[in-house]
Amino acid sequence: GAGVSQSPRYKVAKRGQDVALRCDPISGHVSLFWYQQALGQGPEFLTYFQNEAQLDKSGLPSDRFFAERPEGSVSTLKIQRTQQEDSAVYLCASSPLRGGSDGYTFGSGTRLTVV
Amino acid sequence: AQSVTQPDIHITVSEGASLELRCNYSYGATPYLFWYVQSPGQGLQLLLKYFSGDTLVQGIKGFEAEFKRSQSSFNLRKPSVQWSDAAEYFCAVGAGNDMRFGAGTRLTVKP
């Protein structure tokens, strides 16, 4: 596609509910990143994929967070048993280069609100 | 540990005035440096990047940034701000997939 597409744009979840956030990167982009952006803060790294391999998941805040990219294109970030502190904007970014050292193209994000 | 500091949380400038947004970083090696802009409800858009070579880099929308190794700084500048430049600006530093973002500077433009 022309850009990085994320869905849904907005998600309201009740505490304890599971959610799945989708990212459709630019076609052919090798690297895919997930970031969490709390209100008034900069993006914080969650995880990184190179094709289908998850090379770095050091930023995932707990084992309730899980990400996958099974065919090396679309990625899903899943949050189980959501908590209020999970409320944030979740940004997906992709890059044609391994490691994304040339800068990223970001999607518009999914705003998750846990009530 | 690597870190990025944007000392100014919020800056207000008049339309047509010059702009400088500050960014200081701490990184173990020579980093890649980036500036991104985020409009409300949108993702981040890459303005410019520095990898090596000329320390003054030009970006989109008339922005430029200067890398000063001695000061560990990468400040963003624009000679004449437009109303449409009002947004949140993020400095980022990293190498490979290790990208760290500052907390951002919100720019308000007065008519």
Image (cartoon, coloured by chain):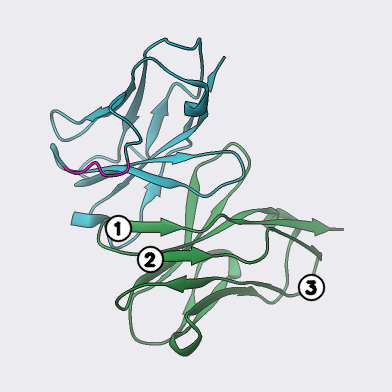
Tell me the green chain.
B
Q: Is residue A45 above or below residue B92?
A: above
Provide the residue designation for mark 1. Answer: B98
Residue closest to the far right: B111
Whether residue B97 is situated above or below residue A88 in the rendered picture: below
According to the picture, the residue beneath numbered tag 2 turns out to be B2
| Mark 1, secondary structure of its residue | strand
Q: Residue visible at 55% across and 70% down?
A: B23
The crowd level at tag 2 (other Cα within 10 Å; few <14, some 14-19, many 20+) is: some
Is label 1 in contact with label 2 (beta carbons under 8 Å)? yes
The amino acid beneath tag 2 is: Gln
**Is A48 placed left or right of B63 in the picture?**
left
Tag 1: amino acid:
Asp
Residue A106 within the magenta-colored segment of the rendering: no
Amino acid found under the numbered disc labelled 3: Ala
Q: Mark 1 and mark 3, same subunit?
A: yes
Instruction: Confirm whether residue A97 shows in the render.
Output: no
Residue B24, percent from left and from top: 52, 73
Q: Hey, which quadrant is residue B77 in on the image?
A: bottom right
Which circle's residue, 3 or 2, is located before the other in the chain? Answer: 2
Give the image location of residue A12, x and y in percent.
53, 15
Depth check, front residue: B63 or B27: B27
First to last magenta residue range: A55-59
Marks 1 and 2, the one that precedes in the sequence: 2
Could you tell me which quadrant the N terminus of chain B lies in? bottom left
Residue indicated by mark 3:
B17
Q: Which chain is cyan?
A: A
- A57 in magenta: yes
The answer to the question of whether label 3 and label 2 lie on touching residues, with beta carbons closer than 8 A, is no
